[in-house]
Amino acid sequence: MIEALKLWNEPNNLSHWDFQMDPDWHQFADMVCQASDTIRGLAPELPLVLGGISPIDPHFIRLLRGYGTLDAVDAVAVHGFPLDWNHWRVDDWPAKVAEIEAVAELPVWVAEVGVSTFGADEVQVFGLQRTQELLRPWAERVYWYSLLDLPQEWGATTRHRESEGSAYYRHFYMGLVRPDGTPKPALEHFDPAFGICQWFHFQDPRLPVAVEWLRRLGVRRLRTGISWADWHRVGALEWFDYQMGMLRDFDVTVTLCFTPPSRGQRPCYTSPPQVIGEFAQFAAEVVQRYVTDAAGAVRPSRAAP
């Protein structure tokens, strides 16, 4: 079921890690290394991936390499959206992957790549087709973001929200399927050899719909998340048992991220934790529940919580 763990999400993006509180990312590096040591002790064969960097920045990878962080993982992930947010061309994808490979000396996973339909459906069709052409050599480890559009009323996880203008609203149009369940034109061009990245909110009612679409498309690899912040909610285990039970037939890369506000140095999901080792404890609980015990004591339910 779980084929890899991804440690954090976009750590060099202020929307996901408050590097003003950790200006040299030393706390982040320690957190990843401690989590890796703990996970290796429980599931030594489970691949570990450094949280997808956004922007794609070789200097950031070089910094973490100096801390020994890259020795703690098996691959480095990158996220890129050149037709929506990044200041580079879609044709630059091979060069972007190559520059991270050269610095990291590890495999590079394209853990999020996508194109919105904010301007027009045809832009997504072109972007999907061109991205698949460029990244097909990495097809086993490319995750298209995303399957489902984000409902407008939910809000997107960004720093400045509506003040970002059109950059903010593009978040709601990244899916291949609209909120009303109708497919977009790009869907018929999607290559199921690629994976899908689909985030699920706590108690997300879209989960059964997503599973149905993934099966219909023939997708095997899925990237999603288990939020450390949500892990502290009332009913969290029931929800994540349900989520992971629904996803048990897929090869899932699980991203572990987001600090519980009560455990942060400030009460925000982007904050470094007060005690760096607590993230490793959370990772251990996830591994014990959904990896090492998955075939034994823990049988995640398929019934809704």
Image (tube, rainbow, N blue to C red):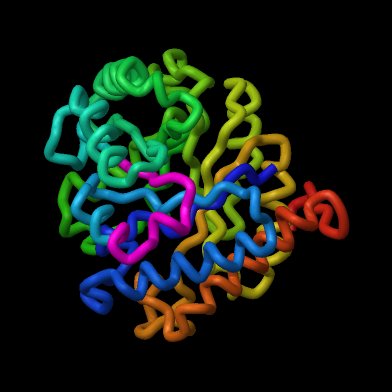
Name the residue at 18% across, 45% down: 166
Q: Which of 163 and 238 is in front in this view?
A: 238
Of all residues, the one furthest to the right in this rendering is 296
Q: Tell me: residue 184, above or below residue 259.
A: above
Residue 165 placement, left or right of 39 = left
Q: In the picture, residue 217 is in which quadrant?
A: top right
Q: Tell me: residue 305, above or below residue 85.
A: below
Q: Position of residue 132 (x, y in %)?
A: 36, 19
Q: Where is residue 138 in the image (x, y as percent from the top left)?
A: 42, 26
Q: Nearer the viewer, residue 21 or 64?
A: 64
Name the residue at 53% across, 62% down: 36
Of all residues, the one furthest to the left in this rendering is 87
Q: Which of 243 and 37 is in front in this view?
A: 37
Let me know if residue 295 is in the magenta part.
no
Observer able to see residue 219 = yes
Observer able to see residue 229 = no
Image quarter of the C terminus: bottom right
Residue 268 placement, left or right of 168 = right
Image quarter of the N terminus: top right
Query: For the magenta stretch, what is the residue range?
Result: 64-79
Q: Position of residue 254 (x, y in %)?
A: 56, 50
Let me know if residue 78 is in the magenta part.
yes
Residue 27 placement, left or right of 141 = left
Name the residue at 56% across, 66% down: 37
Name the residue at 87% across, 54% down: 296
User: Disc count in the image?
Assistant: 0
Q: Tell me: residue 145, above or below residue 282.
A: above
